[in-house]
Image (cartoon, rainbow, N blue to C red):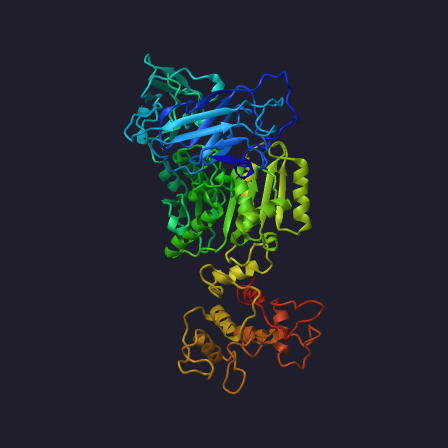
Amino acid sequence: MKIMGKGLITWILVAAFLIPFACSRADAAPPQVIATNPPNGAVGVRPDIDTIQVLLDKPIPWPSISPESKCLSVSDNWPAIVVPVIGFDGLLYHFERMNRGVDLPLGSQVHLTINPPGASSDCVRDEEGTLLPTFELNFTIRQNPDDPPLEPQVVSTDPPRGATGVSPDLSSVSITFSKPMNDPDPRLGSWFLSVGWGPPSVLTWSADRKTLTVTRGDAGTPLTPGRAVMFILNWGLSMRLQDTGGDVLQEYAYYFTIEGDQKTFYENLSNVSILKIPENPAKGFYWPYYLSIPKSLQDPTALFVEPNNSGLPALDHIFHDVTAAELLYSRTAWVNVNWNLKAPILVPTFPRSYGVYTQALSLQLPQNCNCPELERPDLQMIAMIEDAKERLRSMGRIIDDKVFMNGFSASCSFTGGFSLIHPEFIKAAACGGGVPSDYDPERISDLEALTGKQIDLQTYFKVPLYLYVGDQDGNYDADLWLLAEQFYESAGANAQLVLYPGVGHTITGEMYADLGDFFQRHNTIFSDMETVGYWAYPYAVAIYHAGITGGCSANPLKYCPGEPVTREQMAAFIIKAKFGQTFPFTATPHFADVPATNFFFKYIQKMKDEGITVGIGGGLYGPGEPVTREQMAAFIIKAKFGEIFSFTATPHFADVPATNIFFKYIQKMKDEGITVGIGGGLYGPSHSVLREQMAVFLAKAFLGM
């Protein structure tokens, strides 16, 4: 047996689990456990059971337990996480087994004791402070694998589970159980959830209580073609649907797909191909992901990532898979039709269990979890991103190393946390439906402890962020929003915080339009020019599209704007601008330091052929030397006008007198509007030319910008 203290119990998801009273009321009736699943003393329980459910007659705020407390005792085969069920106000708790996926040994026993003898006085008690009497739960796993299940089972459905091509005019479905079922106990919560089925349904039972018929409230209205319809019985790990013997149906997902091809519809609508990429633990991701690839993909482009948000927890992964696919369909239309980004889109299929909120980037797992599929969803996301980029590049696509990321509500938590932990992966990120908590030093400290990685705030503050929420959103807090604004502003962060008046927990059309504007502004050609607002960006893009540059790195495409231009690079710029890629040139090398094997050989040869350069003397060209601004002026003006041209005789710049050998070229540069100098009436003739500056000179000289 193990006594559970702070190490496991503090994994509780509702902040209200604080004891409001310091002492018990002697005259108050103590709270009682009124039902459990499995039933106390049950024999023959299935070996894959991973949740114990306990229902109380009074609300119990679960205590914050110190290591010295002895409030809960469980057998070694049940390392537990305690989860209060949302919506039950402290009446229903789950004790989830964190080594799920591993069957319990046949014939083994499970024991759970709440408030065992010797427990401290601040252990499990009701809102009035009255302690729950010691409660013991015991059950036994079935002895033989072929023993009939103790719990009721779904034995058939109509249409069959997983069916495709179901008529859109279907008005009812039927679900047949292995045992007669009881009338659901209203104290035990909602047990029936439908997705894609329409308005509230009418539920009727057969005379033997074994078959449930679910009839649509809007029968006669066709169901959406290609839509997955899903029913989850005993959703939320409800205990409500039981057989007549009191045994609870395990949460069961029943689904089918309506006739029509939703995937093909969205592929045609958005002109994309949609793939489902299977999980690949060897590459670091344990869940499949969906990938949408535009057929007219803009090269280069950035991968657009949206973490999935199912909205609800569910045991069967099919629920999270279906909702992730539908998210991909809608985002594909928004991103590539409405926003015209022409970007590939990745949506993971992370689960959302009842104890670990993976979709919100839950990084901390209970002890003895034995669940690698839930560990470090941030690293799993990186593995998915790298896999997708590898696939796209193998198709000949030019893909940015950094990604766009977008999230709302739970997926905003994922997006925000991921951007903070891994800012080097983010080109731009948008996060809505909540208040940023990155201003909280404790959050940053916790993330560093959980990841073993120091948060790089300097890089994070450079990431373009769009953070938004409605002032009627339940997650909005005016004081916390103000703290967030002050945090980003004081740090000089590249963050835009937008509050939408009169908007609740939703994304309005105005929000979608603003999101589109945000991502379009940062949908840059070159991955190292982070925003289209960068002063040199339009010139760099212009010379890229004109074929004058291919950047400094091909995949991902980079321009290296801050690097100096060398003489060999200058030759390529000038010759491409004047002649393109195809032109005759002398085959015999003109310069001893530029052999025919030099990548820039043909451009340097053409520079000499055209009389644009004579080298640096001694039969040398100096290919690796940086170009100065006065040399650059000579190169550009000779290429454009030759040696004979008119120019203003009166010096434009104080540091370029008429005696300077480059005077006439620099004068012509100013006359033609190619340069305005470096400010203060100066030109900076001996300064090195940076690639960002070169983009401006070339675009103005040869493209008329």
Question: Residue at coordinates 54% horizontally, 83% vertically from top-left?
Answer: 616
Q: Which percent across, then down, holds residue 546?
A: 48, 62
Q: Is residue 667 above or below residue 105?
A: below
Q: Is residue 351 above or below residue 41?
A: below
Q: Which percent across, then down, holds residue 195?
A: 42, 28
Residue 231 visible (yes or no): no
Residue 71 visible (yes or no): yes
Q: Farthest residue in the left direction? A: 146
Instruction: Specify the quadrant of the image occupied by residue 503.
Output: top right
Instruction: Specify the quadrant of the image occupied by residue 642.
Output: bottom right
Q: Which percent across, then down, holds residue 188?
A: 47, 20
Question: Residue at coordinates 62% horizontally, 23% vertically from top-left?
Answer: 129
Viewer-nearest residue: 650 or 351: 351
Question: Residue at coordinates 46% horizontally, 50% vertically from top-left?
Answer: 382
Q: Is 356 displayed left or right of 445 in the figure?
A: left
All told, the count of numbered labels is: 0
Viewer-nearest residue: 259 or 420: 420
Q: Which percent across, then down, holds residue 658?
A: 68, 80
Q: Is residue 460 above or below residue 436?
A: below
Q: Is 463 displayed left or right of 649 in the figure?
A: left
Q: Is 164 displayed left or right of 358 in the figure?
A: left
Viewer-nearest residue: 397 or 18: 18
Quadrant of the frame with the C terminus:
bottom right
Q: Is residue 331 above or below residue 528?
A: above
Q: Farthest residue in the bottom direction? A: 618
Q: Farthest residue in the top direction? A: 207
